[in-house]
Image (cartoon, rainbow, N blue to C red):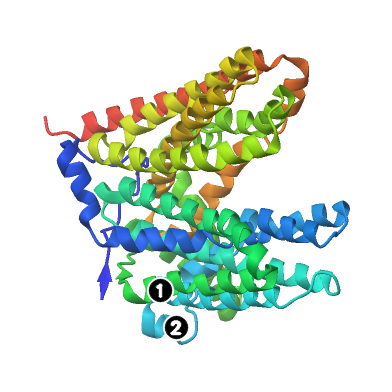
Amino acid sequence: MVDGRPPPDSRQDGLGHTPPRSWRSALGLYRDRRFCSIFFLGLSSGLPLALVGNTLFMWLAREEIDKTTVGLFSVVALPYALKFLWAPIIDRVRFPLFTRFLGQRRGWAVATQLALMAAIAAMALTDPGTNLWLLALFALFVAICSASQDIVIDAYRVELLEEEKIGAGASTYVFGYRVGVVISTTGALNMVGGLGWNAVYLIMAALVTIGLITILASREPLHVVSEESAARERRVSAYLACRPELTRRRAAILAWLYGAAVSPFVDFMTRPCWLVMLLFVVFYKLGDSMAGVMTGYFLVELGFSDAEIGNIGKTVGTVSTLMGFLIGGWMMAKLGLLWSLWICGGAQMLSNLVFAVQAQVGYDTGMLAIAFAIENLAGGMGTAAFVAYLSGLCNLTYTATQYALLSAVASVGRTLLAAPAGRLAEVLDWSPFFIVTTAAALPGLAFLLWITMAHRKRERDQSPR
């Protein structure tokens, strides 16, 4: 059985055409049982992240592995940044047997989840004291399987829901993802004292069955090919077949490579304002990312202890983030994605100012709790709206590839462009620094204004006169 939505307009700008709803009907969207599946799939995606990140680093530290080696272990997370390189394979290649019986998305999901369970179990059975580099190899395999699972689950959830439910689906997914991260960080660390690291990693491997059971109990989404995309690929295939210097086999291989890896780019770059949309993806969360890079350093300089930062962050911060996801999803269902991007982007920008206030107040745990609550609430809302926007940009012909590419582009703002934040903090005092990070959100909102004006013009041109 299949489920899902028809192919979107190839000229889509990611904003959709969802009309405003009443508050009650907006909440009513969540009665769809598919949201339950998306939540558990999000949990399955979030679970492995810390197992090759912070939780693994804690394990290595407890085993008294030297700091240089622990730092080098961060390289094993590289597949998350490079997953767009093999996303076309997951989009186009049929996985033996699994695809035949389960479909393209469910087949790949089951394959990656089984491999992920085996890889985490292999980490659990490896002693870092005697086989450190074998542990690194297994951790790298976990990251590859986890990134592959992310590719297929992102494609699955985008294809599964109708256009008006994409926003609510995105917020449900990121909510589940964060719960998965909490389980593999706070949950895992709380179990270590009584069970030991090896047993905890075995439990984490077993928890991947949550995603496995969910995908087996769910329907295969409707995977469709837009006529425009199919016609473009046929033209290229015919052109290559006519080239006398190419054998039939070589022409067929090049045609496949074009359809899998090149056509997703071509499709996106034929849309109006495509460059503006990419710049918006890069800059929308820049201010939030710049502030986040230096928040820990800022709080240490104010005199907060590790326990105070950790306890308030884990409780107030986590709860506020989850609330932000829910409010963001509700807002998108009620107001539509465009208004939600504006509201969440504005809240995200202004939330940085609360740390400027903290800088003036100084050491005060009550103010810290307020700062964490406001910043994480706004950040959760912004993340939910942003993930929904990326989902809406995808042409269903190339869902896995385009979403992986867009998420890679988004990481530029979170990493490379946010990198100078440390130098900026050295030059400025903390209050001016957070004011500057607030202003850093303005380019993203400027690009959103451009997209909004183009979207409104398009709606006027398409409306009956």
Outermost residue, left side: 465
Q: Is residue 253 left or right of residue 277?
A: right
Residue 98, numbered label: 2
Q: Which residue is at a point 70% across and 22% down the rendered structure image?
A: 302
Compared with 454, 243 (above or below) is: below
How far apart are labels 1 and 2 at the CA level?
A: 8 Å
Q: Are marks 1 and 2 in contact (CB under 8 Å)?
A: yes
- The location of residue 1, given as percent across then percent down, is 25, 76
Report the quarter where the C terminus lies.
top left
Camera sees residue 19: yes
Q: Nearer the viewer, residue 210 or 272?
A: 210
Residue 106, numbered label: 1
Residue 192, numbered label: none
Q: Which residue is at a point 40% across and 84% down the rendered structure image?
A: 100
- The location of residue 185, given as percent across then percent down, is 60, 55
Compared with 449, 407 (above or below) is: below
Compared with 368, 205 (above or below) is: below
- Kind of element beneath mark 2: helix
Mark 1, other Cα within 10 Å: few <14 / some 14–19 / many ≥20: many
Q: Earlier in the sequence, mark 1 or mark 2?
A: 2
Q: Quadrant of residue 344?
A: top left
Q: Which residue is at a point 41% across and 70% down the rendered structure image?
A: 105
Q: Quadrant of residue 63?
A: bottom right
Name the kind of residue labelled 2 in the image.
Phe
Name the kind of residue labelled 1 in the image.
Arg
Outermost residue, front side: 194
